[in-house]
Image (cartoon, rainbow, N blue to C red):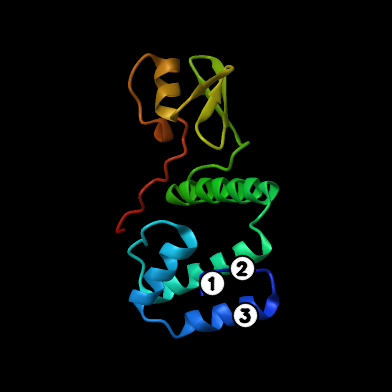
Amino acid sequence: MTTVTSDRVTVLAHIAELQDLDLTRLREQWRALFGTAPPGFGREMMRSRLIYRVQELAYGGISEATRQRLREIDRMAQETAARAAEPDRPVAGTLIIKEHGGERHEVIVLVQGFQYRGQRFESLSHIARAITGTNWNGWRFFGLRRQKVAGK
């Protein structure tokens, strides 16, 4: 059962056989198809991954261009998740303007961090310190912190 060819009937038969195997037999198939010790997957996950592997061996894997696109999508998803963790964070590209000490200070929100006067900063607090020389909560300094409502 471990030899995989691109014959459609053979591939379908191999997939059908995987449906009825217990976890011990699925692990044996893993060793045969991957040439490595099986991971600690449960039966359904193991079967799903083996079915993909049978098709991958028979018809070929995904192209390098597709792999790159998937990595890009993953990176964007991680950035979106990071932004979701900070729901009040302005969207990348937003211009924050602060008048302080008779000067106008402009900060651009980046996907990761901020830009102030051509330099990249990790946080608004670092920029507030660069402007004032003292430690500040950056969100408060730039007027981005919401005021607490009485009774909440």
Residue 31 falls left or right of residue 70:
left
Q: Residues within 10 Å of mark 2 (few under 14, many from 20)?
A: some
Depth check, mark 3 against mark 1: the one in front is: 3
Mark 2 residue element:
helix
Tell me the kind of residue under disc 3.
Answer: Leu
Q: Position of residue 101 (x, y in %)?
A: 48, 15
Q: List the residue tagged with mark 3.
A: 12
Residue 88 in the image: above or below residue 56 = above
Spot occupied by residue 81 in the image (x, y as percentages of width and height): 48, 51
CB atoms of marks 3 and 1 within 8 Å: no
Disc 1 crowd rating (10 Å Cα; few below 14, some 14-19, many 20+) is some
Q: Please say if 101 is above or below 76.
A: above
Instruction: Using the numbered discs, state the Cα–Cα distance from disc 1 to disc 2 in whole angstroms.
Output: 6 Å
| Label 3 or label 2, whichever comes before in sequence order | 3
Among numbered discs 3 and 1, the one appearing first in the sequence: 3
At x 46%, y 35%, the residue is 143
Which residue is at a point 49% across and 67% down the rendered structure image? 49
Look at the numbered discs 1 and 2 and tell me whether their residues touch, using CB distance below 8 Å. yes
Which of the two residues, 59 or 73, is positioned nearer the viewer here? 59
As displayed, is residue 143 above or below residue 19?
A: above
- Point out residue 32 in the picture as x, y percentages from the top left corner: 45, 64
Q: Quadrant of residue 52?
A: bottom right
For label 2, the residue is 55
Q: Which residue has dot 1 on it?
A: 51
Q: CA distance from mark 3 to mark 2?
A: 9 Å
